[in-house]
Amino acid sequence: MSKSFDELVSKATSCGTKKLAVAVAQDDAVLEAVKIAKERGIADSILVGDKEKIEAVAAEMNMDLTGFEIIDEPDVAQAALTAVKLVHDKKADILLKGLLDTKLFLKSVLNKECGLRKGKMMSHVCVFEIEGIDRLLFFTDVAFNTYPSLEDKVTIINNAVEIAQACGIETPKVAPICAVEVVNPKMPPTVDAAALTEMNEKGEIKDCVVYGPLSMDLAIDPEAAKHKGVSNPVAGHADILLFPNIDAGNITYKILVRTAKVKNGNLLIGTSAPVILTSRSDDFETKINSIALAAVVADSIG
């Protein structure tokens, strides 16, 4: 089981070199990440975008582009579609978002003719390594789905379990995060959390253990769970944190990345191949972590 990104990167290097398609690659953080991924044997990249700009950015970084395939496509929308098609046609294993707007990128991912949608709902998983916590934490959904229904949350859990298992967690512990740890009919997320727990107990949600509602402290801090007398195996030891909506998830995510000592990687799942959906402002370390995560998942799903 990978407990840190160093371990995850090591696992990725043992999976065999993957092929990565980069949509609009003319970005220094993206190029730095694909350079490291190539050096470590994680992935070889096809750089799709404005060739002149890619070469100019690489020159500023003193990066040698020898060994990188470049597909010259100056038009941003067409570059995104070209990169998506490479993955759709099995010429690449992983898709990475480069220097373009998320909305335009996702439009290409969802293209009816050559997109990567495979019928089920997509969701976003952010994997965090947080100083003081002895394992990786899987946050979902903090960036894609806004106000998921109970049915949506089942799919979001299943998607996150797929990623956690790829990282070596055989039976992930899932905590539906709420403001309180008791069911309150006036607080719908607590009602959903209880329903998800019951569905898991009945075998309707498989390959994991779900227990909630749990407040954040009770989900990740064993001492807090012990102090409040919550003895369920998930309490204090959660692997997957299911957020009730994008407000709670995204606020928590941004507080962590701006104030705490963390490493993270991001992935869009529910597609026919892993899609790396990072922010244009994310540094190269987040992007290389995401590439390693995607390589491990791609290897797991074959």
Image (cartoon, helix red, strand yellow):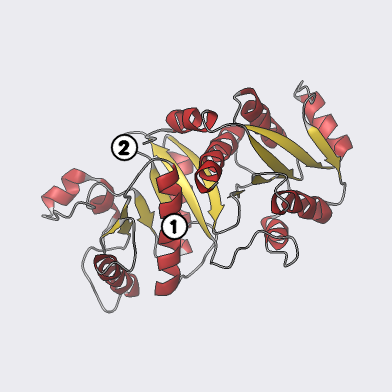
Tell whether 18 sits left or right of 202.
Answer: right
Which amino acid does the dot numbered 1 rest on?
Gly
Q: Mark 1 falls on what kind of element? A: helix
Residue 24 vertical placement versus 32 (above, below)? below
Q: Are marks 1 and 2 in contact (CB under 8 Å)?
A: no
The quadrant of the image that shows the N terminus is: top left
Which amino acid does the dot numbered 2 rest on?
Ile
Q: What residue is pinned by disc 1?
A: 249
The picture places residue 17, in percent across and down from the top left corner, at: 62, 32
Q: How crowded is mark 2: few (under 14 residues within 10 Å), some or many (20 or more)?
A: some
Q: How crowded is mark 1: few (under 14 residues within 10 Å), some or many (20 or more)?
A: many
Q: Mark 2 falls on what kind of element? A: loop
The structure residue drawn at horizontal position 33% and vertical position 72%, both measured from the top left corner, is 192
* Quadrant of the rendered image containing residue 260: top left
Q: How far apart are marks 1 and 2 (CA)?
A: 19 Å
Residue 57 vertical placement versus 231 (above, below)? above
The structure residue drawn at horizontal position 24% and vertical position 74%, both measured from the top left corner, is 184
Q: What residue is pinned by disc 2?
A: 133
Tell whether 37 sits left or right of 254.
Answer: right
The structure residue drawn at horizontal position 41% and vertical position 47%, both measured from the top left corner, is 164
Tell whether 18 sits left or right of 158.
Answer: right
